């Protein structure tokens, strides 16, 4: 989609020459004093956008150096819809993303056109740290190195930026934040950043399993670009009784007119419960006043669709590399057994008892403080399951004949 900086071999050569200059002439410059590298390294954080894959924000490393001919943003968040087997890879959890560098002016213009905020933080790195970082970035955008297997939480555009800065700092960033607890879990961040989109939010809640509810460190929490930026801003170097911040400047290059995402997760289950109950009431009214017996057809259709959804959850768990889709308690709501109940022609007490018992179990598990959060899914679909089970009872399938009535 975007090309890497022009003539990367020349840039690497100049980097080597600059390194040799520091080694051979320590403390000496044209003016008789040691002059550190003039390269500027900035962490750039882009705010969320309107498209679903932009909801979590984005970031890049901006390098400016006149000697090296660099004024580029190094970005790890590119993917190509036209790549081979794109949708198969997406389904299997083996998405290929790639890194690229493009002129900063072009980079920033594209985000401004999308009405996304741009925050830039200039990092106080030593000449050696800058050289290490720039050399790493130039290697990463080479055609043979640029592709990587994307992971939503552990290997995404932000964690790659985090790791690059940590490399420059000799592991200090990881040491500092791996021991600190995160402010929110992976699920909490996912919920708060997608809450504005009712269907995206609910779809992710259905597909994500227990792994996203575990306790994480602040280091792992940096999968969110905003968290990385805030964490970087708090870092200080210490030595000789003095402390200096890692961030020299922290500026907003562009202010978006979009509302900022909520800082914490809100409780959204009431809206799904009301929607679900509304659908149940509509089905009851249709059966009572429009087409008698339609409730049976709707019940069987819902149980069939819900059971198929359960098969999809099992496939994500056992048939793909989506680790965050495993151990998913939503299978208590979307259960493949429902497919059998949709075609059941025997005693319909069994579907009602089974669905009712599993629903009670699901509600009890949802109360566990350290378990998977799936209250929204329960609110949205448990009433539909129970209504479908009731819709299959004998009185709904075939009204009882009155004594003495003609056959």
Image: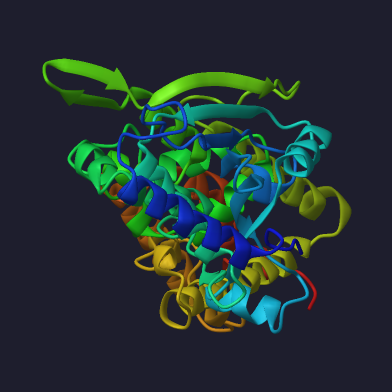
* Position of residue 93 measured from the top left corner of the image (x, y, whole percent): 52, 73
* Rendered image coloring scheme: rainbow
* Position of residue 89 measured from the top left corner of the image (x, y, whole percent): 61, 78
Where 221 falls versus 141 (above or below)? above
In the image, taking residue 192 as reference, residue 168 lies left or right, namely: left
Quadrant of the rendering where the N terminus is positioned: bottom right
Q: Residue at x 42, y 39 (%)?
A: 188
**Which residue lies most toward the right here?**
290
Residue placed most toward the observer, 100 or 222: 100
Residue placed most toward the observer, 272 or 1: 1
Q: Residue at x 26, y 43 (%)?
A: 217
Q: Residue at x 48, y 79 (%)?
A: 320
Quadrant of the rendering where the C terminus is positioned: bottom right
In the image, taking residue 356 as reference, residue 10 lies left or right, namely: right
* Position of residue 295 measured from the top left corner of the image (x, y, whole percent): 72, 61
* Position of residue 333 measured from the top left corner of the image (x, y, whole percent): 47, 61
Residue placed most toward the observer, 287 or 385: 385
Based on the displayed image, in which of its 4 quarters is residue 340 positioned? bottom right
């Amino acid at each position: 989609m975007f090309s890497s900086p022009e003539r990367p071999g020349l840039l690497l050569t100049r980097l080597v020459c600059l390194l040799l200059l520091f080694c051979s002439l320590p403390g000496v410059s044209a003016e008789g004093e040691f002059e550190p590298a003039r390269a500027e390294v900035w962490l750039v954080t882009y705010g969320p956008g309107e498209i679903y894959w932009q909801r979590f924000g984005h970031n890049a490393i901006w390098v400016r150096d006149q000697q090296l001919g660099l004024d580029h943003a190094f970005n790890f968040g590119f993917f190509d819809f036209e790549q081979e087997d794109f949708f198969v890879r997406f389904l299997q959890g083996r998405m290929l993303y790639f890194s690229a560098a493009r002129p900063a002016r072009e980079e920033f213009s594209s985000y401004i056109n999308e009405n996304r905020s741009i925050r830039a933080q200039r990092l106080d790195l030593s000449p050696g740290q800058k050289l290490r970082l720039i050399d790493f970035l130039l290697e990463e955008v080479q055609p043979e190195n640029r592709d990587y297997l994307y992971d939503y939480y552990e290997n995404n555009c932000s964690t790659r930026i985090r790791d690059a800065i940590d490399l420059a700092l000799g592991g200090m960033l990881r040491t500092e934040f791996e021991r600190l607890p995160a402010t929110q879990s992976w699920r909490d961040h996912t919920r708060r950043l997608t809450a504005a989109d009712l269907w995206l939010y609910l779809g992710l809640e259905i597909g994500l399993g227990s792994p996203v509810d575990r306790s994480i460190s602040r280091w792992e929490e940096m999968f969110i670009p905003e968290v990385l930026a805030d964490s970087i801003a708090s870092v200080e170097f210490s030595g000789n009784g003095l402390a200096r911040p890692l961030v020299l400047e922290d500026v907003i290059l562009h202010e978006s007119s979009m509302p900022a995402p909520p800082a914490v997760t809100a409780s959204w289950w009431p809206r799904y419960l009301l929607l679900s109950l509304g659908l149940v009431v509509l089905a009851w009214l249709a059966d009572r006043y429009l087409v008698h017996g339609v409730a049976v057809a709707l019940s069987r259709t819902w149980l069939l669709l819900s059971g198929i959804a359960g098969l999809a959850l099992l496939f994500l768990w056992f048939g793909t590399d989506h680790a965050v889709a495993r151990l998913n308690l939503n299978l208590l709501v979307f259960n493949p057994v429902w497919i059998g109940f949709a075609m059941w022609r025997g005693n319909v007490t069994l579907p009602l008892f089974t669905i009712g018992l599993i629903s009670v179990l699901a509600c009890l598990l949802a109360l566990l403080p350290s378990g998977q959060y799936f209250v929204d899914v329960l609110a949205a679909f448990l009433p539909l399951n129970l209504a479908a089970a009731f819709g299959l009872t004998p009185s709904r399938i075939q009204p009882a004949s009155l004594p003495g009535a003609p056959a």
